[in-house]
Image: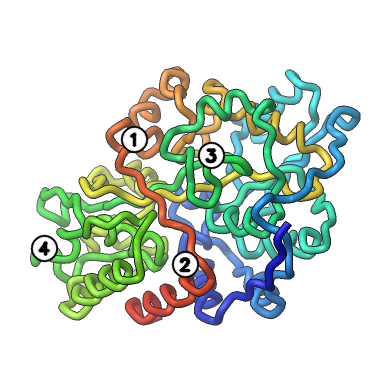
Amino acid sequence: MESYEPERLSPVQLAAMRRSLTNGRGALTRRSLLRASGMGGLALGGIATLGACGIPPAGRAEGAAAADDHSAEEKEVTFSNWTEYMDVSDDEKSRPTLEAFTKRTGIRVKYTEDINDNVEFFGKIKPQLAAGQNTGRDLICVTDWLAARIIRLGWAQKLDPSNLPHAFANVSAQFRTPDWDPGRAYSYPWTGIPTVIAYNAKATGGRKVDSVTQLLDDPKLKGRVSFLSEMRDTVGMTLLDQGKDPGKFTDTDFDGAIGRLQKAVDKKQIRRFTGNDYTADLSKGDIAACVGWAGDIIQLQADNPDIKFAIPAAGYITSSDNLLVPAQARHKTNAEKLIDYYYEPPVAAQLAAYINYVCPVDGVRDELAKIDESMASNTLILPDKEMAAKSRSFRSLSTEEETAYEEKFAKLIGA
């Protein structure tokens, strides 16, 4: 495999990660995002490790060499996931879908909620991956940008399609071909995280807000608009509004989006750039409309019927959390069987009913309706065909691009 030089994070990249961990999506546990509450401590130790050492040389392009697979003689699999990202029984003493998997297959699942943010978790497993050692985990769940990095570094094992018949057949079209893993050779999505437009109908006088253009130009919204402090979400939504594809944009396109946002800042149309803390202001009506995360909106709607959401005609940004088998994992086949299990519609429905994120599994609607009809009809959990067709992903960035773009974005938002 081709080797390459250490990939160091620039100061501006580190600043962007600190911002994300402080009040952005990285600051949230998966379930607490629905409650619009922030995480406690920051994982700055993990950031410092990444910044000081860089990422050691590694192979790439072909992924990790196949490790010795002990799945046949060791009927177990170790799964690291985010907190509250798995269904739990009413008495909180068991995890029904995991128990059903073990009962069916005989494979015992050691399930650990040891991922609180991507950077901190990568800091935990990086030394073993770089040294070609087993991390002690057979399956991990990380956000798309980190999944892309792990695959690029050659630290993920290529999956065997013969062990993934349900996953291969049922992964939704909008998640099937990310530019960092075309055809899902190394990963499968666990959930999708949409970025949408949200508004308080009482604060807007009953008017619908359904475009970034409205947010940036409507004089009736002046000073009562917020955008997110996460670059990919805010710039991605603006690129779409300008008719550009966030999956294929150029430097000129990016600069155009920044310039468009800067004009709105200069004329005080935008009140501020926020992490998840926009939710309180939106609910009170201090912010009339904003760019926000779907998980927040589901929870806010439960408490405030004035909170609405809209999918712009131009499209919306969706990121994802993804399952990978790390290099040197001992139980690759067992991990693949577990991935495939969660792509069976009845199982996927049970998971979606608990975590309330976008389900990446086709054919799950009828199964979810058996559990909760309102969830089955909620397009923030199960996008309909029209909504799914508008979903776009922000393309992968090189280290140089990310440094340049984050620097421009930080200047825009005053970070």
The residue shown at (35%, 56%) is 246
Dot 1 corresponds to which residue? 379
User: Percent from the top left, x then y, of residue 382?
Assistant: 39, 33
Q: Quadrant of residue 275?
A: bottom left
> Mark 2 or mark 4, which is nearer the start of the sequence?
2
Using the numbered discs, state the Cα–Cα distance from disc 4 to disc 3 in whole angstroms. 41 Å
Dot 2 corresponds to which residue? 23
- SS at mark 3 in the image: helix
Q: Pointer 1: residues within 10 angstroms few (<14), some, or many (20+)?
A: some
Disc 2 and disc 1 in contact, CB within 8 angstroms: no
Residue 218 numbered mark, or none: 4
- SS at mark 1 in the image: loop
> Mark 1 or mark 3, which is nearer the start of the sequence?
3
The residue shown at (68%, 72%) is 5
User: Percent from the top left, x then y, of residue 140?
Assistant: 68, 47
Which image quarter is the N terminus in? bottom right
- SS at mark 2 in the image: helix
Please state which of residues 198 and 241 is positioned toward the viewer in this rendering: 241
> Mark 1 or mark 2, which is nearer the start of the sequence?
2
Using the numbered discs, state the Cα–Cα distance from disc 2 to disc 3 in whole angstroms. 33 Å
User: Percent from the top left, x then y, of residue 169?
Assistant: 53, 25
Position of residue 314 relative to residue 56, above or below, is: above
The residue shown at (9%, 67%) is 219
Give the residue type that dot 4 points to. Asp
Dot 3 corresponds to which residue? 183
Q: Pointer 2: residues within 10 angstroms few (<14), some, or many (20+)?
A: many
Please state which of residues 407 and 49 is positioned toward the viewer in this rendering: 407
